[in-house]
């Protein structure tokens, strides 16, 4: 087993990893930027190393600094959390070259899943359902036109290097295709330095439902059921829940089986997520695979009683998984509390937290790195806390979330708490009747 793990991240996820390391008797090293010297991950780690100034590009993304911090502290593994270097193939490789175990995917796996057209071809070969469309990258606009006719409008043009909706265009009519093709290619080139495009049939008002998987170093994988992440705004998730209100036992078994096949086909090692689009007829299609621990992992932990960070560490150390799958025994909901003004287009609102009172009680979990007096730096993403509630049923979980949001006091900065409180009363949300389109129609009341 590892003796010392360096956490190449900040905020709540750094703290989350430190907590599990402590429970496992593993020493921890925090790295931090000059803007984060007062952060809790620095306080709670056994050692802490400053790796640079506030901008991520000069600290949390600066690979040589992080490797140097691991070497001077004698860390034998690095946990990257999510974001930053978590899905950076170069960094995974660099760790390997320095004989430091990267607790995440290999460079080869990250590259394979990062190229979306390639990932899709791999999944198709593994027998995972994929949206009908082009076989790989489209070579010319002439081919694009021909493919759109064959596929049938509406179609979706997607950037192979994409993700998060960049370089993606829905096309409803043949006369709109040229513009979409040109502008999607341009956007993709600017964002990723690559303008390879592929095409799919457009799935109208899909749900975003993902399956958590874990694979070990012996080629065995299991799933831990789904998370419904359909409540999103500009490709940012706002709240997630498990089980999905749209799920059936039959659909869960089919999606779980597809996700496990996918993981075993590529010999996936570690925790990962297979994302699917689910249409109104409960057809499901592979969308993307994430080769990292995700922000919303706690809701899965709560309903199947399983520490995903512990499992990441165990499989990285070569321990085999049990091999069984896990099914939700409870209902869990997460609200992402961001320092943003929900009454002003979710505009980021960094600043100093003057008052902080966290909710508590049975079934309430708070994953956060902030406290009263904490200064939220403007340099990083605006998530300051994850409020996770768990109960026997969805109705009880919603009631518990309302209660927890009502006793959550944050003063000094604007937060998304009022948004979540209204969401929990929204008739369509309460009915479980929501898709990825939900936020387009949502209007916050003053
Ligand atoms: C789609 C789709 C409809 N049809 N693909 C959005 C991000 C990305 N990586 C894929 N996305 C989508 N792909 C087909 N064939 C609709 C979306 C989509 C979406 C998916 C999940 C969550 C939120 C979304 C918001 C808008 C569009």
Image (cartoon, rainbow, N blue to C red):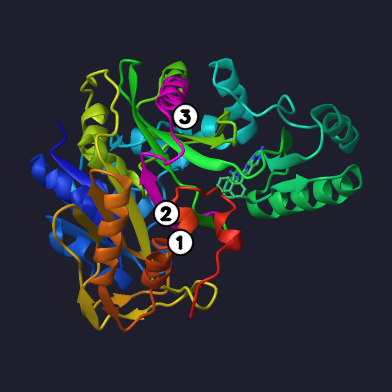
Picture layout, residue 69 above or below residue 109: below
What stretch of residues is rendered in magenta?
235-259
Whether label 2 lies within 8 Å of ligand 1 gets the answer no
Q: Name the residue under label 1.
A: 426
Instruction: Report the side of 39 relative to 52 (left or right).
Output: left
Q: Position of residue 364 (x, y in %)?
A: 20, 56
- Label ID, residue 109: 3
Residue 239 on the magenta span: yes
Instruction: Report the side of 378 relative to 31 (left or right).
Output: right
Q: How crowded is mark 2: few (under 14 residues within 10 Å), some or many (20 or more)?
A: some
Q: Position of residue 362 (x, y in %)?
A: 14, 54
Residue at left offset 54%, top offset 21%: 128
Q: Earlier in the sequence, mark 3 or mark 1?
A: 3
Picture layout, residue 243 above or below residue 192: above
Q: Check contact, mark 1 vs mark 2: CB within 8 A.
A: yes
Which is in the foreground here, disc 3 or disc 1? 1
Residue 104 on the magenta span: no
Where disc 3 sits, the SS reads: helix
Q: Can residue 79 be seen in this view?
A: no
Instruction: Report the side of 155 relative to 421 (left or right).
Output: right
Which is in the foreground here, disc 2 or disc 3? 2
Q: Quadrant of residue 149?
A: top right
Q: Quadrant of residue 340?
A: bottom left
Q: Earlier in the sequence, mark 2 or mark 3?
A: 3
Picture layout, residue 39 above or below residue 211: below
Q: Name the residue under label 2.
A: 430
Where disc 2 sits, the SS reads: helix
Where disc 1 sits, the SS reads: loop
Residue at left offset 59%, top offset 31%: 281
Cα separation, mark 1 vs mark 2, equals 6 Å
């Amino acid at each position: 087993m590892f003796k010392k793990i360096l956490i190449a991240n900040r905020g709540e996820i750094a703290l989350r990893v430190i907590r599990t390391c402590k429970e496992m008797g593993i020493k921890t090293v925090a790295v931090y930027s000059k803007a984060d010297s007062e952060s809790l991950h620095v306080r709670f780690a056994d050692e802490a190393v400053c790796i640079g100034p506030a901008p991520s590009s000069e600290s949390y993304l600066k690979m040589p600094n992080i490797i140097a911090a691991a070497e001077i502290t004698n860390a034998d593994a690095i946990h990257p959390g999510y974001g930053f270097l978590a899905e950076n193939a170069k960094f995974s490789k660099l760790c390997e070259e320095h004989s430091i175990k990267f607790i995440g995917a290999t460079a080869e796996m990250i590259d394979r899943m990062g190229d979306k057209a390639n990932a899709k071809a791999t999944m198709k070969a593994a027998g995972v359902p994929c949206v009908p469309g082009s076989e790989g990258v489209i070579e010319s606009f002439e081919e694009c036109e021909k493919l759109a006719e064959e596929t049938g409008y509406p179609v979706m043009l997607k950037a192979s290097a994409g993700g998060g909706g960049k370089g993606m265009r829905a096309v409803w009519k043949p006369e709109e295709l040229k513009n979409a093709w040109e502008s999607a290619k341009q956007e993709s080139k600017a964002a990723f330095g690559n303008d390879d495009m592929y095409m799919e049939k457009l799935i109208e008002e899909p749900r975003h439902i993902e399956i958590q998987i874990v694979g070990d170093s012996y080629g065995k994988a299991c799933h831990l059921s789904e998370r419904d992440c359909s409540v999103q705004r500009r490709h940012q998730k706002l709240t997630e829940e498990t089980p999905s209100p749209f799920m059936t036992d039959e659909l869960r078994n089919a999606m779980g089986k597809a996700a496990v096949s996918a993981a075993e086909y590529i010999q996936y090692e570690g925790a990962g997520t297979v994302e699917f689009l689910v249409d109104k007829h409960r057809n499901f299609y592979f969308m993307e695979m994430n080769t990292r621990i995700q922000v919303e992992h706690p809701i899965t932990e709560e309903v199947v009683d399983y520490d995903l960070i512990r499992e990441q560490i165990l499989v990285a150390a070569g321990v085999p998984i049990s091999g069984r799958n896990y099914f939700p025994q409870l209902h869990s909901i997460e609200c992402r509390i961001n320092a943003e003004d929900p009454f002003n287009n979710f505009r980021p609102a960094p600043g100093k937290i003057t008052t902080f009172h966290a909710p508590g009680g049975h079934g309430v979990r708070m994953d956060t790195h902030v406290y009263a007096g904490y200064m939220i730096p403007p340099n990083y993403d605006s998530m300051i806390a994850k409020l996770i509630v768990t109960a026997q049923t969805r109705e009880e979980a919603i009631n518990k979330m309302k209660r927890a949001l009502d006793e959550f006091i944050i003063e000094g900065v604007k937060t998304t708490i009022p948004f979540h409180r209204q969401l929990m009363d929204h008739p369509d949300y309460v009915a479980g009747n929501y898709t990825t389109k939900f936020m387009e129609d949502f209007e916050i009341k003053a």
